[in-house]
Image: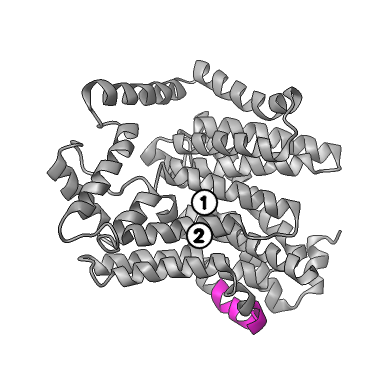
Amino acid sequence: MTTFFEELRQNSKTYNFLLLQMMALPFSIAFGSDYGRPILPVMFLTWLFVVKKSDLSYIFQQKVVVVFMAFIAMHLLSLLWSEHAVNGAQTISRMIRYIFLPIVIYASVMKESSVKYIISAFILGMFVNEIISYLIYFDLYETEFSKRHHWPVGFINHIPYSVLVAFTAILILFEAKHMDNGYVRAVYVAFFMTMTANLVISSGRTGYAAYFGSLIILLFSYYTLTIKNFLQVLIFPIAVFGLAYNLDAGVQARVKASVSAVEQINTAKNYDTSAGARIAMYSITQDILDQPENSIIYGAGTGGIKTLLNESIERTGILNQPFDHLHNSNLTAYVQTGLAGLFLLLLFYYFFWRTPVKSEEALFIKQLLLLIVVISTFGDVILSIKETMLFFGIFAGLVIFDGRLRTDTA
């Protein structure tokens, strides 16, 4: 196995410069988009000097890429009937920059030996953020972000952070399972444990759902279902959550708030809670598309979600406070582009799941990534938040690249 510096000596200076940027971007994700934003344009310019026509030819032949391009095209088309076209153009620009561009760059010019450095850079960035999160939690350190929002998270909203933690923890568990070095495996298992605990204190219930949903589904895919394997995979996470519930007042408050939200919906039709508002968004979405100027087939047009949402809240009276977004990426696509756009998004999920890959690691990442993202889209606008957009674009690019390795060796 070559070391990182041996790898650099074997590559051209231009590719090495690009590789360093391709490592810096995943490392920066949990530190906030302010760090990733300036990396992207430089990376794109460097990529232009490295990419070959054959690289692009392969990428744009992939069904998953073609469908995502059609999804973007549907948003562009919807600007024709949008009353907020300028805002819509900004939405599409973010989609291209933070999802589509990373997919194309990482899928087209990667080298097989470089993939491990990209993944390691992301894990290292999450490890640093985990340390900062614990320091904040124990009142030993603060960032400007944590001072403002009072979450034990250093740089980004606690919901996308919890999604990143959920993905990282389960990925680390997979990596530990396949390590030959017992000492390194022990370090990774310990990291999995501390990451799981970090997920608990980060206050992101969307991450909780993504974590347990993905963990249970992957348990059936990657383990022979025995009592021993079941306990090994699930006993620690369940124990951590149980312990946190008994010792951490914040965790108790979030669990009780979720239970109370369901009770209030059932008994008083009160949706003015965090969970209740997410349920109310389904009725609000339908109300928006029922208006005569909009269409269930092609939507209300990209842009202006905040305006459409709050007009509907005022019209229906289902909620008593304004909101900035629908807290659901799938509903957002439905409102903006109707059934046509929602179908393309679901088709993208399907083709991504069906993307052929060469390595077992890539197969696991593909399945874990899609499970984490899809489950999370029901709790927040994961496909509209820059950090999680970058996260998805980078790892989706790595998966598609691995599929190319499979094709080349077939």
Which residue in the rendered view is the most extreme toward the top? 246
Determine the main secondary structure of the stretch shown in magenta: helix
73 with respect to 36 (left or right): left
Q: Is residue 388 above or below residue 157?
A: below
Which residue in the structure is indicated by mark 1?
31
Which residue in the structure is indicated by mark 2?
348
In this rendered view, identify the residue nearer to me: 67 or 39.
67
* Number of numbered markers: 2
Label 2 secondary element: helix
Label 1 secondary element: helix
Please, what is the three-letter code of the amino acid marked with disc 2? Phe
Q: Residue 5 shows which numbered tag?
A: none
Q: State the image coordinates of residue 185 (x, y, percent, origin top left).
A: 79, 38
Q: State the image coordinates of residue 161 (x, y, percent, origin top left).
A: 50, 44
Q: Is residue 312 above or below residue 74?
A: above
Dot 2 alpha-carbon crowd within 10 angstroms: few under 14, some 14 to 19, many 20 or more: many
Please, what is the three-letter code of the amino acid marked with disc 1? Phe
In this rendered view, identify the residue nearer to me: 186 or 396.
396
Residue 134 in view, yes or no: no
333 with respect to 247 (left or right): left
- The residue positioned 44% from the left and 20% from the top of the image is 252
Residue 213 in view, yes or no: yes
- The residue positioned 44% from the left and 41% from the top of the image is 159
314 with respect to 269 (left or right): left
Task: Give the magenta part as a residue range.
Answer: 43-55
* Mark sitting earlier along the chain (1/2): 1
- The residue positioned 77% from the left and 39% from the top of the image is 177
Q: State the image coordinates of residue 95 (x, y, percent, origin top left).
A: 43, 64
Cα separation between marks 1 and 2: 28 Å
